[in-house]
Image: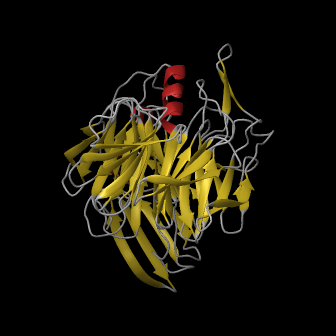
Amino acid sequence: MRMLLSVCLFIIIGGVLAGCDSSGSGGGFIPTGDIIAVAQRGGQNQTIKVGGTAGSVPPGSTVTVTNLDTQQVETTTGLQDGSFDPEFTGSTNDIFNVQVNNNGNLVQDENIGVTLLRNAVMRDLAKLGRVPANIIIRDGLAYVLNGFSNNIQIFDLNINPPQQIDTIVLPMGSNPIAMDFLDNTTAYVANNSAQSIAVVDIVTGECDTLIVGEDDVDETTPCEEVIELPGSPFEEPAGVLVANGKVYVSNNNLNEFFSPNGNGFITVINPLTNQIIDTIDASGANTTSMLEMDGSIFALNNGNVLFDLETFLFTCDDEFPPSVDEIDPQIDTVIDNINIGFSEQNPLVCLPNNLTATEDGFAYTGLGLVGALLKVDLLAGEVVNGPDNPIIITDLSGLNNTADIAIKGNLLFTSLFNSDQIAVLDTDTDQVNPFPYITPFPAGIRGDDPNAVIFDGVQSLAVRQGEDFTGADIFFITGLSEQLGSVDSTLETQ
């Protein structure tokens, strides 16, 4: 569903498949610490914040920042958490002096140059297949699912730039959209258009088995084995989750016009036999993203949107409200439902598209029509930020798509498809653009030029977890220009 919506938006807006790479200059040197000067891109008359992250200065200390090129001085006080961030307008070639006085003693005195968010982004690292739909990172490898190319590219992230080391070929017409790993050799792939599940060997790069309903058998090459199941057990499979020794496959269950054909459902597969052992009826329509938390499985029912071919306007479909189902994997039954619903005051806040959670059970999801996020407390079964009070990333009146979300520590990264950006959220406070991420990362054409007619379509993204590597920790794909890119969220300060 995520890929289909992206293609739909692309056609409506009239974009052109394109990519670009432009970087601005920054002066001085890059600091190695918690106090930095940061701007979005290089040039004159740029907004520059000179500040420190939590713990960088003593709370209550006096911080004096001087632009050594213009002699502009800003004085502030260290906040309770030890942070500060005065703002300047100047050239990104300027040098700033930071002095910290605590109880009359000078405890810090340093000169720093400007770090550019734009320089933390690398674009066009590799050419992807047609209409890439998803990227997953595991053990230093990135797996890119290409919908129209019907394959999975595998990139080694330990090589700079990442190098493609293998391609898993799937049957024609598969349209792979989601993937999860059973173990170190086997993964399950949801083929959204072919109504099938592919069992692939991630070591040999082969498709071992194709699981498909007998009513939907079409192309099966190059999969070595085909398991035909009675009827049509899959209806636009959209998500895969390996949990409790089983494989859960969410199904959009759409009609030929990509609208809900009733509620979605989840097919449960025994990985020992690759036979279906249960089917779970969802309580809402267009079931997609799933995650496991605190012994339960949570499945997102996206709902639906309507599009008027005469006015070219989207509206939320109130017949199919979005919600989250809680499933007990011991009995494979929906035991609770978190209703997300709609908002009269925010009529485009609908079609949530990817459920991602913090370790303490707060799940965030992007939206298909506007640049905002919703937040749900999974463990309490409550909506924290719903359609009435979403977490706003961009203007709610403009068409955008927070297409994907990835979380690393207390930082949430979300891709903005239509504006070619990657925005950052502090999940401890839900603050958008927390210092030093004072603006979203410009990750495509419109990130550099918001008025550009063409754009890259920054889509799915994934986090490289851990600290035992150098270089970028965020990797993203563009749905329109079909490129692999990366972001070093450390800004080279570590």
Q: Residue at x 77, y 36 (%)?
A: 318
Where does the C terminus fall, quadrant-wise?
Answer: bottom left
On screen, residue 286 above or below 311: below
Name the quadrant containing residue 336.
Answer: bottom right
Q: 343 above or below 332?
A: above
Q: Nearer the viewer, residue 105 or 262?
A: 262
Coordinates of residue 148 in the picture (x, y in percent):
37, 30
In the figure, is residue 28 to the left or right of 165?
right
Instruction: Confirm whether residue 284 shows in the render.
Output: yes
Report the residue that reaches farthest toward the right: 344
Residue in the foreground of this view, choosing between 295 and 213: 213
The foreground one among 77 and 291 is: 291
The quarter holding residue 105 reads bottom left
Q: x%, y% of residue 272?
A: 39, 61
Left or right of residue 222: residue 341: right
Q: Which image quarter: residue 226?
A: top left
Q: Is residue 430 visible?
A: no
| Outermost front residue | 230
Across and down, in percent, residue 393 comes to: 59, 46
> Which coloring applies here?
secondary structure
| Residue at 34% across, 30% down | 172
> Residue at coordinates 66% horizontally, 49% vertically from top-left?
281
Total numbered circles: 0
Asked whether, in this view, residue 7 is left or right of residue 398, the answer is left
Residue 140, position as x, y percentages in the image: 27, 60
